[in-house]
Image (spheres, rainbow, N blue to C red):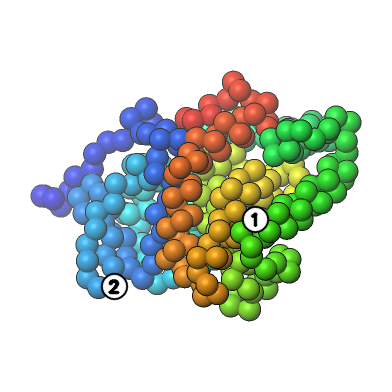
Amino acid sequence: MSGGQRLLIKITRDSLPQVKDKYPFLYLERGRLEIDDSSIKWLDADGNVVPLPVATINTLLLGPGTSITHEAVKVAAAANCAICWVGEDSLLFYAAGHLPTADTRNLKQQMLLACQPEQAVEVARRLYARRFPQAELSGKTLKEMMGMEGYRVKMLYQQKAEHYQVGWKGRQFTPGKFELSDLTNQILTASNAALYGILCSAVHSLGYSPHIGFIHSGSPLPFIYDLADLYKESLCIDLAFALSREMAGKYQKAMVAAAFRERVIQQDLLANIASDISYALGTTHARRHRQ
């Protein structure tokens, strides 16, 4: 820097990587995000300094003990890198910053569909069809489809437990008392929360709202929960039972984070999010991967 002026590289929408081409997320805790010339740097509790290529990262998940400067927020927003505030190891999702480059046409289409009961049920039906392609969903009401889902998910848990030879007494989670759950439920809770953070940032980036759902309702992020169900079987449920065998009864957060991150990348989650939303809402004309 010289003459009291910052060096900033002008970033345009066209020069940014598309959502599907970015690295899914980076979890940070106990440190500070600041600006170094035109880039963001991470200063951890041990004094290490790491530059972050935010233009190629979809989401920064900020855990406990983190702080961020106003300038760092501006640079991240200019690079269309979402910022989410989460609990330790992403066990709780608190908030996400809305990106200013999102296209409001997608939000308008989402709202129009949600406000028309028949159209809203069609969106729900397409979401269920994505998960259960062999199911007969024609003419089913939302309540009927939710009942079918409940039975299938219960059977899925049991099948995974038998496949991996892991004991299973059902899904249990008490907010604020993570340690009271058994190992498999702890892994499920952690991976679910991380998935919600990624989905929330991607939904914001694509110009949709996390708050306008088609299956879930009466919760803070219904559209996120709608979408999360598309990916939970492979990203969270199968992972939880597979890792339960490896961990031998003791929760290991580093192993969970590494395994979850590997699956997210292998399954190309960010590209699937954009195409799955477009399919569900019937908006193939919308800017699916634009930012």
Residue sitting at 61 percent across and 30 percent down? 278
Instruction: Determine crowd level at label 2: few under 14, some 14-19, many 20+ residues with C-alpha closer than 10 A.
Output: few
Q: Reply above or below: 110 against 180.
A: above
Locate residue 52 relative to residue 283 in the image: left or right: left
Query: Which one is earlier in the sequence, the residue at label 1 or at label 2?
Result: 2
Label 2, secondary structure: give it. Answer: loop
What amino acid does circle 2 point to? Ala
Q: How far apart are marks 1 and 2 (CA)?
A: 42 Å
Instruction: Determine crowd level at label 1: few under 14, some 14-19, many 20+ residues with C-alpha closer than 10 A.
Output: few
Q: Residue 45 carries which label?
A: 2
The percent position of residue 177, horizontal first and vertical second, equals: 62, 77
Can the viewer see residue 70? yes
Q: Reply above or below: 217 against 45.
A: above
Direction top: furthest residue: 285
The percent position of residue 70, horizontal first and vertical second, equals: 35, 57
Q: Reply above or below: 15 against 211.
A: above
Q: Can you identify the residue that label 1 sits on?
A: 163
The percent position of residue 219, horizontal first and vertical second, equals: 71, 56
